[in-house]
Amino acid sequence: MDQQKLALHETLETHEIINLKTVCLLRSKLMQGICFNNELKQLMQKDVQQSTDAINELLPFYKQSEILH
């Protein structure tokens, strides 16, 4: 059975979402180092985990791109 591939516009949208989540991840991770409020650090750690989960969930779709095959 053939594996479905993402159309070009779907590939672009997936790429944009992955980029957004990567920026969220990096920003929260960097801000944790300069934050002194423990509640805020916990929120940023939660954002890091959610962003990581989202990226890992999106990558298999991105690998189905027409461009990559």
Image (cartoon, rainbow, N blue to C red):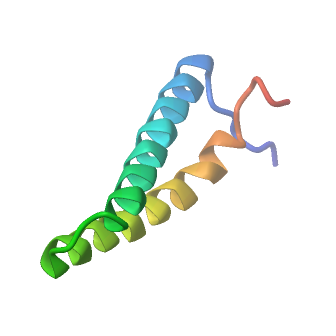
Which residue is drawn at the image coordinates 65% and 52% (left, top)?
Answer: 60
Residue sitting farthest toward the top: 8
Left or right, 11 with respect to 29, comes to right
Q: How many marks?
A: 0
Q: Measured along the vertical axis of the image, is residue 6 above or below residue 46?
A: above
Left or right, 62 with respect to 58, comes to right
Image position, residue 67 (x, y; %): 76, 23
Q: Measured along the vertical axis of the image, is residue 18 above or below residue 11?
A: below
Image position, residue 1 (x, y; %): 82, 49
Which residue is drawn at the image coordinates 41% and 57% (left, top)?
Answer: 30
Residue 7 vs residue 47, the one in the foreground = 47
Residue 54 vs residue 49, the one in the foreground = 49
Which residue is drawn at the image coordinates 55% and 32% (left, top)?
Answer: 15
Which residue is drawn at the image coordinates 41% and 62% (left, top)?
Answer: 29
Quadrant in the picture for residue 48: bottom left
Left or right, 3 with respect to 20, comes to right
Image position, residue 58 (x, y; %): 54, 50
Image position, residue 35 (x, y; %): 24, 67
Residue 43 vs residue 56, the one in the foreground = 43
Instruction: Indicate the quadrant containing the C terminus: top left, top right, bottom left or bottom right.
Output: top right
